[in-house]
């Protein structure tokens, strides 16, 4: 208990205790003024300097025991006579009996509050443990923030206390996903509306935000509001046309919407009533469960097989074949062997599997039978290994070099393994034998990207004193690293001489316009710094990162119209992301009016049937002398083509401006001939049109022509 709290007790007690006890002002030294101590009669009296020091220590101990509490004005304490603490328990203001004075007094530590979640506050009051914080240090991990308005520990005080998944601090001190509808429209969430009860994004607030025949409700297994059916009109999923008004689930059938012929409605699902509606691998109807199964009393399984719980199983060996010719009649499974279907020569039946019983049951690379494990192995006493080999743990291993060859010509007789080298099988020129492996002993054994031998580790490395690096490079830890900018190129043209790493920029190799050098890398400072990065044209000034979008206005296609929190253009999830003149349909934004097309760019008119912006819906949307056909403006007469070089005539069948004869191509000297197929002016139609071309002066053989398939004067 601190000195201010001790002074409070010293002040309160003399004023409210009855006659004969007004001068009882302490229970221990901590409740006395500086320079005094608490005597056996409850008086604060003078004490020596040594006693004061000891009292100061005890005051610190008491202060550590007293928990933090809210600032509460207790008022004057009533005087209650007592002989034990139990007689004071009814008063949270004075829960402790002070003897020999016999009066109830305030607490000085939490242990005096009697448990039940109460703590002794700094104001010497027994209060609930959740009340009374004055700083975050007095709060726990689960509720780390002290709310000064309530004096309670909570999950958060401001948004800064919350995480990225639940970024908003609600008024009750809880971190939630959303606090407004706008929060949900910036997230990939369950819906565009904020459910203020749970602080999560939901599909709806009211039925008006759902489809016809649906209601907005909270489903038991979901923590958010969703749209569920109220009538059959609210069921849109194919095959489930019926709404159960109690569970709000769409079902296959009901009494008012029965199943088809041969089927019955059971708990909203269509099931069989006889074999007529079953076929294929499940031709029989289980009439009890209304399910199509493999077999039944009316649909048997055939010879050697029986029907068990709607499934065909074997009943004797005639029901089995192939690699599992025997029937385990207890398990009704076809197995490899049984007493009636024994195994072949040298083999025996163990747990319904054929295994070896002698060497005659084995062959190939494992010709010996381990009769303890019934496994075929490489060798045994009866099947020894070849020359230079011995049998160890049923495997043939080497005992001499003669058993080894190829890249491992030496036998390590300690491990019985063929290895690359040994004393009897040394390595080649420039190599040495290290741990049974050939490793370099000199530079002559190394080449390519690692031309130097590190004779300490016997590894070929990039450089050494005898094999230095090239221009602008230096050898560090057997690796060639940059020493100057000359040793760097490409995307990392600058050398960080402290780390010897090639980096994106430096004082000697600055970044281009719109970028700055930060931590050895060029980062954007504005959008011009992102121009060279395909697909990410926008610069985030805070993180210096090139991204696809900053706002949805940067996403100009209807298929990815929404800028997500990762600054990438995404498919839409709900209508609000498409603006008031658009709607979300299958992840893309459909137009609802021409106003949407005007903001989206591209074609100017909205086709409400398809939700796509098009060039025209009627001829009034087209220029003069043009007509609207299949949502495209096409020419209707020659006057529509006036002023178009080389295409002065209207082909009404195509709706395109074309040339009609070579004279129409006079305005395009490089392409003086009219191609009747394309309706455009070209350089040539036949070889004779290319008489001035150099390639046509060369004698042509094998059917080569000067006027090629692209109507250009050149050899094919």
Image: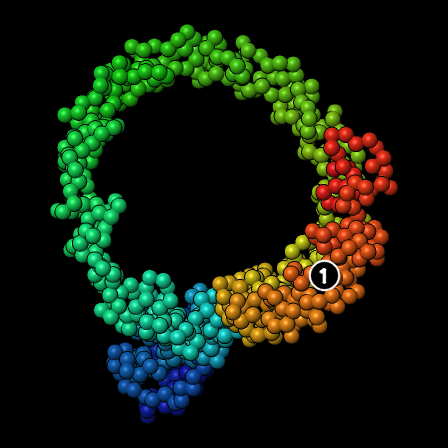
284 above or below 465?
below
Residue 108, how many percent across, how many down? Answer: 38, 76
Identify the residue position indicated by label 1 in the image. 657
Q: Is residue 21 left or right of residue 660?
A: left
Nearer-the-camera pick, 227 or 690 = 690
Q: Residues within 10 Å of mark 1 (few under 14, many from 20)?
A: many
Quadrant of the frame with the C terminus = top right
Quadrant of the frame with the N terminus = bottom left
| Figure label count | 1
Asked if residue 291 can be seen in this view, the reply is no
What residue appears at the point 56 percent right and 61 percent down from the top-left corner?
559
Nearer-the-camera pick, 57 or 286 = 286
Coloring applied to the structure: rainbow
Nearer-the-camera pick, 548 or 627 = 627
Residue 283, how many percent across, how many down? Answer: 22, 47
Q: Secondary structure at mark 1?
A: strand
Residue 650, how many percent across, how many down? Answer: 71, 63
Residue 516, how many percent across, how many down? Answer: 74, 57
């Amino acid at each position: 208990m601190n000195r201010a709290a001790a002074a409070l007790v010293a002040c309160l007690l003399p004023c409210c205790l009855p006659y004969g006890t007004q001068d009882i002002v302490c229970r221990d030294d901590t409740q006395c003024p500086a320079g005094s101590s608490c005597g056996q009669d409850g008086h604060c009296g003078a004490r020596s300097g040594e006693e004061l020091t000891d009292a100061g220590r005890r005051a610190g101990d008491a202060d550590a025991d007293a928990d933090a509490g809210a600032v509460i004005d207790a008022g004057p304490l009533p005087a209650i006579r007592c002989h034990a603490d139990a007689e004071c328990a009814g008063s949270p203001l004075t829960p402790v009996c002070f003897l020999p004075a016999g009066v109830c007094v305030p607490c000085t530590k939490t242990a005096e509050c009697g448990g039940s979640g109460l703590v002794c506050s700094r104001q010497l009051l027994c209060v609930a443990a959740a009340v009374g914080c004055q700083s975050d240090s007095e709060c726990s991990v689960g509720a780390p923030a002290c709310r000064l308005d309530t004096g309670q520990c909570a999950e958060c005080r401001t948004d800064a206390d919350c995480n990225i998944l639940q970024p908003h601090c609600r008024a009750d001190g809880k971190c939630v996903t959303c606090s407004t509808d706008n929060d949900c429209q910036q997230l990939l969430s369950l819906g565009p509306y904020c459910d203020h009860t749970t602080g999560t994004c939901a599909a709806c607030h009211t039925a008006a935000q759902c489809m016809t025949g649906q209601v907005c409700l909270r489903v038991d297994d979901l923590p958010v509001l969703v749209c569920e059916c109220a009538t059959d009109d609210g069921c849109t999923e194919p095959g489930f046309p019926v709404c159960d008004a109690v569970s709000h689930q769409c079902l296959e059938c009901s009494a008012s919407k029965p199943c088809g012929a041969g089927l019955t409605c059971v708990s909203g699902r269509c099931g069989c009533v006889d074999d007529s509606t079953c076929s294929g691998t499940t031709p029989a109807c289980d009439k009890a469960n209304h399910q199509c199964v493999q077999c039944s009393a009316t649909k048997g399984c055939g010879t050697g097989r029986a029907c068990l719980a709607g499934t065909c199983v074997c009943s004797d060996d005639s029901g089995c074949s192939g690699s599992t010719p025997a029937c385990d009649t207890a398990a009704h499974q076809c197995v490899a062997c049984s007493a009636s279907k024994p195994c072949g020569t040298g083999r025996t039946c163990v747990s319904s599997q054929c295994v070896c019983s002698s060497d005659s049951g084995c062959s190939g690379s494992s010709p010996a039978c381990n009769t303890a494990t019934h496994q075929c192995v490489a060798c045994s006493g009866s099947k020894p290994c070849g020359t230079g080999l011995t049998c160890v743990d049923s495997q043939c291993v080497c005992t001499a070099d003669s058993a080894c060859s190829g890249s491992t010509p030496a036998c390590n007789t300690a491990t019985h393994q063929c290895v690359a080298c040994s004393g009897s099988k040394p390595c080649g020129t420039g190599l040495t034998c290290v741990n049974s492996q050939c490793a370099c002993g000199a530079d002559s054994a190394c080449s390519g990207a690692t031309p130097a031998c590190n004779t300490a580790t016997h590894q070929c490395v990039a450089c050494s004193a005898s094999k230095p690096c090239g221009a602008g490079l230096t050898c560090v830890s057997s690796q060639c690293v940059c020493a100057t900018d000359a040793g760097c190129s490409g995307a990392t043209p600058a050398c960080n001489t402290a780390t010897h790493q090639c980096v994106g920029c430096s004082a000697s190799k600055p970044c281009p316009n719109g970028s700055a050098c930060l931590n050895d890398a060029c980062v954007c400072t504005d959008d011009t710094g992102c121009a060279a990065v395909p697909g990410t044209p926008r610069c985030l000034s805070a993180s210096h990162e090139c991204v696809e979008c900053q706002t949805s206005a940067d996403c100009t296609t209807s298929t990815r119209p929404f800028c997500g929190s990762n600054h990438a253009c995404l498919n839409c999830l709900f209508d609000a992301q498409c603006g008031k003149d658009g709607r979300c349909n299958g992840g893309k934004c459909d137009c609802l009016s021409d106003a949407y097309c005007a903001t989206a760019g591209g074609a100017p008119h909205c086709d409400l049937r398809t939700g796509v912006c098009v060039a025209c819906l009627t001829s009034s949307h087209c220029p003069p002398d043009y007509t609207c056909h299949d949502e495209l403006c096409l020419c209707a007469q020659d006057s529509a083509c006036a002023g178009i070089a080389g295409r002065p005539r209207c082909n009404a069948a195509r709706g395109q401006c074309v040339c009609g004869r070579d004279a129409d191509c006079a305005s395009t000297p490089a392409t003086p001939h009219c191609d009747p197929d394309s309706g455009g002016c070209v350089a040539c139609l036949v070889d004779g049109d290319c008489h001035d071309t150099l390639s046509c002066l060369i004698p042509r053989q094998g059917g080569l022509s000067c006027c090629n398939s692209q109507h250009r004067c050149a050899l094919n």
